[in-house]
Image: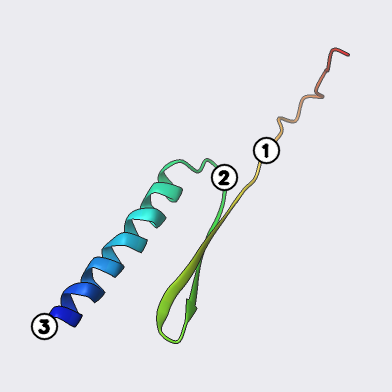
Amino acid sequence: MNTLKTKQETDAAWLKIVLQQIGSLHYGVVQIIVHDGRVTQIERTERVRLDKQPLTYEI
């Protein structure tokens, strides 16, 4: 029974991280890496979309 609780806690931990990453992402990708049936890594790539108007920079 203790093993089951540990698995549930682990699942809740990575799920919480994924939800946080998705919640703060405007445009991009959140990847969940699985190895031997368990989540081992979470990767986030955020994209920045530029408007169709040309950007002007002050130098």
Quarter of the image containing the N terminus? Answer: bottom left
Residue at image mark 2: 27
Disc 3 + disc 2, Cβ < 8 Å = no
Picture coordinates of residue 46, whole percent (x, y): 61, 47
Picture coordinates of residue 3, whole percent (x, y): 19, 81
Question: Label 1 amino acid?
Answer: Arg
Disc 2 + disc 1, Cβ < 8 Å = yes
Disc on the earlier residue, 3 or 2 = 3
Residue at image mark 1: 49
Q: CA distance from mark 3 to mark 2?
A: 41 Å
Disc on the earlier residue, 2 or 1 = 2
Disc on the earlier residue, 1 or 3 = 3
Which corner quadrant of the image does residue 44 belong to? bottom right
10 vs 41, left or right, is left
| Residue drawn at point x = 36 percent, y = 62 percent | 14
Point out which mark residue 20 bears: none
Q: Looking at the picture, does residue 33 appear above or below residue 16?
A: below
Kind of element beneath mark 1 = loop
Q: Residues within 10 Å of mark 2 (few under 14, many from 20)?
A: few
| Residue drawn at point x = 14 percent, y = 79 percent | 2
Residue at image mark 3: 1
Q: CA distance from mark 2 to mark 1?
A: 8 Å
13 vs 56, left or right, is left
Residue placed furthest toward the left: 1
